[in-house]
Amino acid sequence: MLLCKILSGEMADSQLEVRHFPFLIGRSSESELILRDQGVWDQHLRIDLIPEGYLHCQVIGQAIAMDDKGQSFQNIRLNNGQKISIGETTLQFWISTPIRKGNRIKELISSGIITFMTLIQLFLVYLLLR
């Protein structure tokens, strides 16, 4: 999962959880994150999850984006806490470990089986020592 915090611009102090990739940022209604600030293009950024397991940010077309060091880029690997400026908007990205769903029941069943087997073993030891 990726958390996108908007630090400046019209939507400052808001955040968005990104769960699906590719993730598009721009003015267009086709974008998942629509920004109306000055300097933001219709399709400005695209974020992809690369098979090697990292997030890749690409500037689309002739748009301009700056990293947290003030350097313009076309392609960048997203790091935890990375800041990117597009037009008057500054975004910050936080990468988190995906939350696994559906394992709670499996964990409870496994714990129950282990507890049951331990009780049986204790009972057998009790019978042997009698």
Image (cartoon, rainbow, N blue to C red):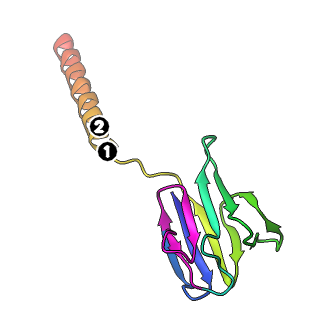
Name the side, left or right, on which 99 lies relative to 36: left
Closest to the observer: 49 or 17? 49
Locate residue 72, reporting x and y percent: 81, 69
Q: Which mark is residue 102?
A: 1
Q: What SS does tag 2 mark? A: helix
Tell me which amino acid carries mark 1. Gly
Locate residue 23, reporting x and y percent: 54, 61
Q: Which mark is residue 67?
A: none
User: Which SS type dominates the magenta stretch?
Assistant: loop
Name the side, left or right, on which 114 lies relative to 36: left
Give the total of numbered labels: 2
Q: Are marks 1 and 2 in contact (CB under 8 Å)?
A: yes
Crowd rating for badge 2 (residues with CA inside 10 Å; few <14, some 14–19, many 20+): few
Locate residue 81, reporting x and y percent: 66, 66
The residue depicted at 20 percent of the width and 15 percent of the height is 124
Residue stretch in magenta: 17-36
Q: Which mark is residue 106?
A: 2
Locate residue 91, reporting x and y percent: 63, 74
In the picture shown, does residue 99 fall above or below 28?
above
Closest to the observer: 45 or 3? 45
Name the side, left or right, on which 84 lies relative to 17: right
Tell me which amino acid carries mark 2. Lys
Name the side, left or right, on which 119 lies relative to 80: left
In the picture shown, does residue 78 fall above or below 39?
above
Residue 41 inside the magenta-drawn segment: no
Disc 1 or disc 2, which is closer to the eye? 1
